[in-house]
Amino acid sequence: MKEFAFIFRHSNIDTFHPSPEQMQERMNWLASIVAQNKLVDRGNTLSPFEGNAKTVIKQDLITDGPFTEIKEFITGYLVVRAQSIEEAIEVALANPIIKSGGSIEVREIIKRY
């Protein structure tokens, strides 16, 4: 099986306030991935607030923000197992963030060891 990173994005931090029902739906989605033995790393929520992210370019060049041109904020990430990117996309499509205007970037993890 391959591993894929799911990077969760949302368009506006001011409008991203999941209800208890939405949080339960997300937990149910996560539990289904665990039950299928597809969860590799649960990840964590990433801070969307200024001052909590920096980009290190070189020793004397450190800038604010996680990215220079990002239009959305990254809410968190997961790593899952799947046979193919198509299967990983199917798993991602079931996540409730899609219903609230968010998106999930799916990237295959390339292991080089």
Image (cartoon, helix red, strand yellow):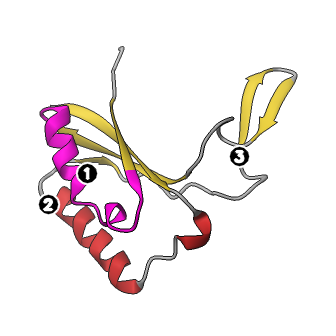
Occupied quadrant, residue 21 = bottom left
Q: Which residue is mark 2?
A: 35
Q: Which residue is mark 3?
A: 53
Foreground residue among 1 and 95: 95
Q: Which residue is mark 1?
A: 92
Q: Which residue is painted at 32% across and 67% down in the image?
A: 99
Q: Which residue is painted at 15% across and 37% down in the image?
A: 86
Secondary structure beneath label 2: helix
What's under tag 3, amino acid-wise? Ala
Q: Is residue 94 left or right of residue 42?
A: left
Of callouts 1 and 2, which one flags the residue occurring earlier in the amino acid sequence? 2
Q: Which residue is painted at 84% across and 24% down in the image?
A: 61
Q: Which residue is painted at 33% across and 20% down in the image?
A: 111
Q: Position of residue 107 (x, y in %)?
A: 34, 33
Question: Would you place residue 13 above or below residue 36 in this image?
Answer: below
Q: CA distance from mark 2 to mark 3?
A: 33 Å
Q: CA distance from mark 3 to mark 1?
A: 26 Å
Q: Position of residue 91 (x, y in %)?
A: 19, 51
Q: Image quadrant for the C terminus?
A: top left
Foreground residue among 86 and 11: 11
Tag in front: 3 or 1: 1
Foreground residue among 43 and 103: 103
Magenta stretch, residue numbers:
83-103
